[in-house]
Amino acid sequence: MTEALHVVTGAFGYSGRWIAHHLLEKGLRVRTLTNAIGRDDPFDGRVEVHPIDFENHEALVESLRGAEVLYNTYWVRYNHHSRNFDHGIAVENSRKLFAAAAEAGVERIIHFSVAHPDKAPDWTYFRGKVAVEKILHESSHSYAILRPTVLFGGGRNVLINNIAWMLRKFPVFGVFGMGNYPIQPVHVKDVARVAVEQGELRENVTIDVTGPETFRYKEYIGLMAKSMGLRRLILPIPSIVGWMFGKFLGVILQDLVITRAEIRGLKRGLMASDEEPLGVLKFSEWIAEHGSEFGNRYQNDLKERKYRLPKKNE
């Protein structure tokens, strides 16, 4: 009997990697669709690799044909047109991917969204997330839309690493406003587990995926500093000052450190949920064990994200 095929977009990335690992542990056949360049293969060749070309509908259909489940982690964090990052393009690419999945006979789509996209600041990132969710709602697909909060664990911890880097570099850490807004981190392996569990079901659902602990943001930062063996003064600062400092750092580091919409979303408490937590791994225990490993170098997300651009006139 042929092993069931499951397809993961971006299995060489962060959340996609752990979904693929979880599927392999269950003895399933796994394929990834990716346009990443130069990423190491963490699966020792056990995951089939197909290029993802949203402009080639026939190839996209063939790469999905025979798959029971598609796990879609594809998205872009920011608009950066010279690197082919654009939220509007990402929405249309998602539409093309779902259409190809329907034609290929994929039974179920597990789609990664973001917590509270409908309550988020008026930014194209969140509007795009809402638009893609709407595409699924109006389709005939069987789907699960997962809305994780802020991820931790699993190796590639860009957000946590870069907060840790700033804690190491500066004696004072500024939190936006008073820092009393909630943050509810969830381990990436918990998110992968929930995704694979949903892949076995067929009911249409939209669910938040959160961890078992909720912190005030300033407590979250303080816990990180303590786990790193650092004593840091954590001060409230106006949001505009924090954004301007991030902008200044971004020029030096040649990266996008923080956006105003991300700051507003954080302050509105969008990184926490009132739903029952589905994660079981605790951030407090994880950071206590791994805190000393982070922040020794800045992790430049923009420079690390290299993609194969579609050829013109194809």
Image (spheres, rainbow, N blue to C red):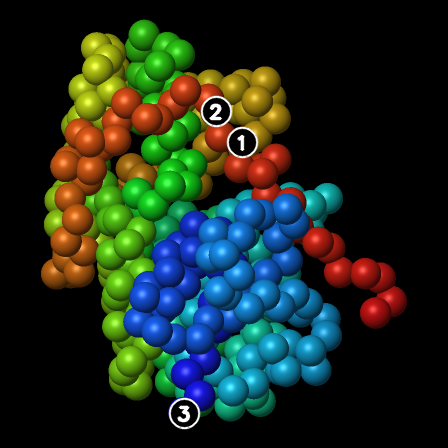
Q: CA distance from mark 2 to mark 1?
A: 6 Å
- Residue 277 against residue 79 in the figure, above or below: below
Q: If you read the primary sequence from the N terminus, does the residue marked by circle 1 or circle 3 appear first?
A: 3
**Amino acid, disc 2:** Tyr
Q: CA distance from mark 2 to mark 3?
A: 48 Å
Query: Which label is found at residue 300?
Result: 1
- Which residue lies at the image location 75% right of the left edge and 60% below the top edge? 310
- Which residue lies at the image location 26% right of the left edge and 27% below the top edge? 291
**Amino acid, disc 1:** Asn
Q: Is residue 225 visible?
A: no
- Residue 237 against residue 162 in the figure, above or below: above
Query: Which label is found at residue 1?
Result: 3
**Amino acid, disc 3:** Met
Q: Nearer the viewer, residue 108 or 120?
A: 108
Q: Is residue 104 left or right of residue 134?
A: right
Within-10-Å neighbours for mark 2: few <14, some 14–19, many 20+: some
Q: Residue 117: x and y, percent?
A: 37, 57
- Give the mark toward the camera: 1 or 3: 3
Q: CA distance from mark 1 to mark 3?
A: 45 Å
Within-10-Å neighbours for mark 1: few <14, some 14–19, many 20+: some
Question: In what element is the residue under mark 1?
Answer: loop
Q: Residue 289: x and y, percent?
A: 20, 31
- Which residue lies at the image location 84% right of the left edge and 62% below the top edge? 312
- Residue 83 against residue 20 in the figure, above or below: above
Query: Which label is found at residue 298?
Result: 2
Tell which residue pokes out farthest to the right in this image.
313
Question: In what element is the residue under mark 2?
Answer: loop
Q: Is residue 31 left or right of residue 234?
A: right
